[in-house]
């Protein structure tokens, strides 16, 4: 069996709907994980749960998107990045 080259595979994948390309990309990226970050999913799940708890308890101060972007842009202008 002749293996197709990367360019032909890429052209094929790019013709797929966005959702299918996204699923494929996740699968390819997952295939690169050789177990070095085996605990990463669990750690992220714990971090997400912690953040949700902070939001629900009112401990976290939420900032509207527009306000956050203004703060980020101001930091860029001030050279604080």
Image (tube, grey):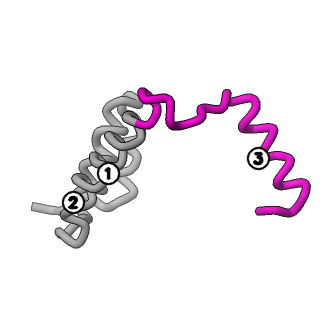
Answer with mark 3 or mark 2, whichever residue precedes in sequence: 2
Q: Which residue is mark 3?
A: 72
Which numbered disc, 3 or 2, marks the residue closer to the eye? 3
Q: Does any portion of residue 12 appear in the rendered image?
A: no
In the rendered image, residue 74 lying in the magenta stretch gets the answer yes
- Distance between the Cα atoms at labels 3 and 1? 25 Å
Q: For the C terminus, give its image quadrant.
A: bottom right
Q: Is residue 1 left or right of residue 14?
A: left
Query: Measured from the top left, where is residue 27 in percent x and y?
Result: 24, 49
Query: Measured from the top left, where is residue 46 in percent x and y?
Result: 28, 48
What segment is highlighted magenta in the picture?
Answer: 54-81
Q: Is residue 27 left or right of residue 62?
A: left
Q: Does any portion of residue 31 appear in the rendered image?
A: yes
**Residue at figure coordinates x 16%, y 62% from the top left:** 2
Say few, some or many: other residues with alpha carbon within 10 Å of mark 3 (under 14 / 14 to 19 / 20 or more): some
Which numbered disc, 1 or 2, marks the residue closer to the eye? 1
Tally of numbered tags:
3
In the rendered image, residue 75 lying in the magenta stretch gets the answer yes
Q: Is residue 1 left or right of residue 49?
A: left
Q: Which residue is mark 2?
A: 31
Query: Measured from the top left, where is residue 57 in percent x and y?
Result: 43, 29
Q: Which residue is mark 1?
A: 44
Say few, some or many: other residues with alpha carbon within 10 Å of mark 1 (under 14 / 14 to 19 / 20 or more): few
**Residue at figure coordinates x 86%, y 63% from the top left:** 79
């Amino acid at each position: 069996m002749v293996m197709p080259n990367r360019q032909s595979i890429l052209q094929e994948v790019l013709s797929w709907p966005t959702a299918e390309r996204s699923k494929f990309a996740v699968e390819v990226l997952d295939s690169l994980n050789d177990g070095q970050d085996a605990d990463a999913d669990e750690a992220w799940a714990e971090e997400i749960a912690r953040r949700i708890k902070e939001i629900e308890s009112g401990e976290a101060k939420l900032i509207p998107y527009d306000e956050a972007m203004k703060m980020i842009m101001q930091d860029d202008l001030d050279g604080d990045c």
